[in-house]
Structures are given as C-alpha cells and as structure tokens.
Amino acid sequence: MLELKNISKRYENRFLADKLSLSVSRGEIVALLGASGAGKSTLLKIVAGLEQADTGQVFFDQQDISQLPPEKRHFALMFQDFALFPHLNVLDNVAFGLIEQKLSKKAAREQALAMLERFNLATHATDKVTTLSGGEQQRVALARALITQPKALLLDEPFSALDAELRQSLREEFKQHITSMGVTTILVTHDESEAHAMAHRGFRLSAGQLTPAW
C-alpha cells in the first residue's frame, strides 16, 4: 500500500498540500483531479521523490520512504511527452530499465520482446520510436514503465498530447494492462471522463485538501 500522511507543501503564499493524507491499495488506480496549478503534479513529484514535502511522510508497505531518492523507490513515472529515447529503437527503449538494473542485454531484450507482444507492438521492435504514431509511442512508454515491475506507477496527464478519439481508446487498454499486473497507480488528470474510465476512486485537490470525487 502507498500512503501519504499529513503531507504539507507551501508554494509562495499558499498551500498546495495542507496536512494531506491518502492511501492507495496494491493494484488500485486512484485519480487526482483539480484545476491547473492546484498542485496535482507537485504531489506526484513528492510521491516519486523528485520534490520534498515541507512536512509529512510517504510510506510504501509501511516503510517510510520519505528520504529515499527516486531511484531507490522503484516507482515508474509517465508524463504527457512520452520521454522515449529517440536514438534507440522500440525494443531497446523497453529493455532500457532492465539493462539499468544490470540484467544482460540479451535477457533484457527477450523480456522486452515478450512485453511488446503483450502490447501488440512486436512488429515494431526494430523501428525507431520517432516513426510511431502518438498512440503507439504511449503504448511503448507504458510497456517500458511496467517491464521493471515497479512498486507503483505515477501517471501525469499521460494522454493530454493525444487527440480525443485516441485518448478514449487508450484509457481502457491502459487500465487493463495496469490492473492485470496489479500495480498501485496514481493518475493525475484534468479530464473527468478519463478519471472515471480508468480509476477505481477519484479525489479532487483544491486549496491543499483532497475531497472524494466519487
């Protein structure tokens, strides 16, 4: 379980988080909604270890990870810009995280190919990621995020760069992949329909407080 306990974060003269708490169970997808500038992405960065809270703690499976650097938390992040490596082909983009974990390149590529087959992307294995459509690039990004079996998946507006029709088709697909792998997930989005389509629970962030959206 991922837990935020009494998280506070002040920006200039206002609270982005004010003694805020949240629990996300293993395999659960929780959506964070709110206006632009409400602090949704900042909260995600605190969970990831990219920013420090002013006060409060982040726990995973009852272990306080508040002081752990991002690479020690074993969380995966996905952003709207995909963040794929343009100099690598599709297969090596997906294998990258495993190679970073000291798996041999051969074994990493074998696992990456199996993951691409799961995402119906195996025929693109040797393609440059720059030749793929937006939807295909986002599928590659998710495959790369999930292959390392992260403890948690943090999604920051993952579909906002895509057109409306493609966003709609990817929502259910992403939910199926994430749920089948049992990954604890926080989804930051401004899109109500996207939140309802993907998340088991939703919360609205406003004035530093989380209130249930449904």
Image (cartoon, rainbow, N blue to C red):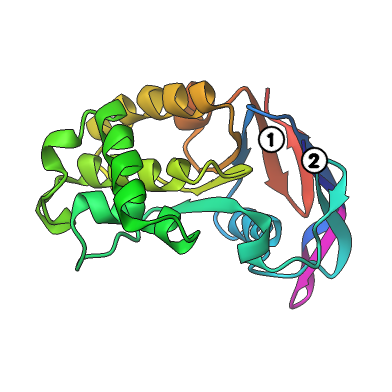
Residue occupying image coordinates x 87% and y 43%: 62
The residue positioned farthest toward the bottom in the image shown: 12
**In the image, is residue 62 part of the stretch drawn in magenta?**
no
- Disc 1 residue type (three-letter): Phe
Q: Nearer the viewer, mark 1 or mark 2?
A: 2
Percent of width and height locating residue 173: 36, 24
Report the side of 84 relative to 90 (left or right). Answer: right
Report the side of 72 relative to 80 (left or right). Answer: right
Say whether marks 1 and 2 touch (CB < 8 Å).
Answer: yes
Q: Which residue is mark 2?
A: 22
In this rendering, the answer to whether 200 lies above or below 166 is above
Q: Is residue 82 visible?
A: no
- Quarter of the figure with the C terminus: top right
Classify residue 162 by image quadrant. Answer: top left
* Mark 2 neighbour density, 10 Å: few (under 14) some (14–19) many (20 or more): some
Total number of numbered labels?
2
Query: Secondary structure under badge 2?
Result: strand
- Disc 2 residue type (three-letter): Leu
Which span is picked out in magenta? 6-15
Percent of width and height locating residue 7: 84, 56
Q: Which residue is mark 1?
A: 203
Q: CA distance from mark 1 to mark 2?
A: 9 Å
Percent of width and height locating residue 178: 49, 29
Query: Secondary structure under badge 1?
Result: strand
Report the side of 119 relative to 57 (left or right). Answer: left
* Mark 1 neighbour density, 10 Å: few (under 14) some (14–19) many (20 or more): some
Report the predominant secondary structure element of the magenta stretch: strand
Classify residue 110 by image quadrant. Answer: top left
Residue occupying image coordinates x 38% and y 56%: 104
In this rendering, the answer to whether 43 lies above or below 144 is below
